[in-house]
Image (cartoon, grey):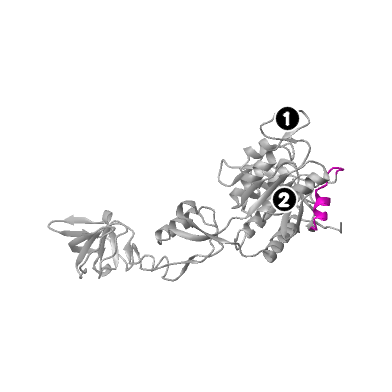
Amino acid sequence: MAFVPTMTFEQARACVVQQVSAARQRPAMEDAGLESLAGRVMAEDVTAERDIPALARSVRDGFAVHAADVPGTLEIIGEVRAGGRFDGAVARGQAVEIMTGAPMPRGADAVVMVEHVTRENPGKLHTDRAAEAGQFVNPQGCEARAGEILIPAGKRLSYPDVALLAATGRERVPVFVQPSVAILATGDEIVPVNETPQAHQIRNSNAYSLAAQVARAGGRPRMLPVARDEYAHTREWVEAGLSCDLLLISGGVSAGKYDIVERVLADCGAEFFFDRVLIQPGQPLVFGRARGKFFFGLPGNPASTMVTFEIFARAALELLGGQCETALPFIQATLTQDFRHRTGITRFLPARLGPGPGELTPLRWSGSGDVPALSRANAYLVAAADRAEWKAGENIHALLQ
């Protein structure tokens, strides 16, 4: 194998995004209904069919008036509610009772809240409040103009996007086909989940955590049988995995005698972009391309597998799925206790946000195999490689889980 570089976190992340962005092709499209759009990626721009709102409308319950007429006493000439229209016009000295969401009557240019009005019989109101033109009124087209792009192609759909599609009459829309992702766990020590492991064995948790992460990121997981620490068996399933859009291999990428994944990949014609990243957990991390498909050789320890997927493989999957951009959900948080580490690597350690707003507490953990600590966490504390310590009350980066 030719020399493969070691990279910092920032270099490795940029490498993944650059390589996948440069090589990816536009995914195939399919139509999907509103009920199944959450998390899918739009394949075409969605534009407004008309102004939103189509008419000026009230944002309060009250009375539609001429702003110049108040404060004062006005004649009530009718009412309009959401879903209805007032066919007449509001002349000077007149008012129309109006409900939230109802279209503004012609002639009126402001709304006085019902709480600020006293009714005077017969059919009159009085208000001591002044008003400005446009008060409590959403003008026609203030949310979007006809023809304006509402949802661009390449956007992963959130629940507000689904609401917007429904509100604009899109019962079915074109989305990109979700990438297929092969998941290959390796190692003689791994047994199926439904077996009782002996003391020297472990259950195959990595394949299931990766399947959950893949599905959350918009992919279709395909779980392969466990590859044993034997060249022919590993190569058989690596080649099967390369038939998918992305291959994730868990384990077998360290420097041990039976860590043969890189040799198998090299014999499949792989190009390696990096095989070690200066992070914890997850230093022995391989990223490359073979037979036109990208692959990640993720470390076998569960925490390392989960972390490296989130900060590297997820970006590749999102881009392959048609997203225009990918970003890590970093936030600034306030430490609840002192924290220190040895510089030189970026650490992603289990932590918990709360109970106070923006507070972050590092959790006790026992290393890369400590799945219970990750289950208790809702974020990762991100310790920069060039800083050794933080005091309680100082800000530090956190990555949402």
In which quadrant will I find the N terminus? Answer: bottom right
Q: Residue tagged by mark 2?
A: 240
Q: Residue tagged by mark 1?
A: 197
**Position of residue 287 measured from the top left corner of the image (x, y, whole percent):** 75, 55
- Give the magenta range: 256-270
| Residue 10 seen by the camera | yes
Q: Earlier in the sequence, mark 1 or mark 2?
A: 1
Element at label 2:
helix
Element at label 1:
loop
**Position of residue 90 measured from the top left corner of the image (x, y, whole percent):** 21, 68
At label 1, which amino acid type do we have? Answer: Pro
Alpha-carbon span between mark 1 and mark 2: 27 Å
Q: How many marks?
A: 2
- In the image, taking residue 105 as reference, residue 140 lies left or right, namely right
Q: How many residues crowd mark 1 within 10 Å: few (<14), some (14–19), many (20+)?
A: some
Residue 188 vs 142, above or below: the answer is: above
Residue 63 vs 348, above or below: the answer is: below
At label 2, which amino acid type do we have? Answer: Ala
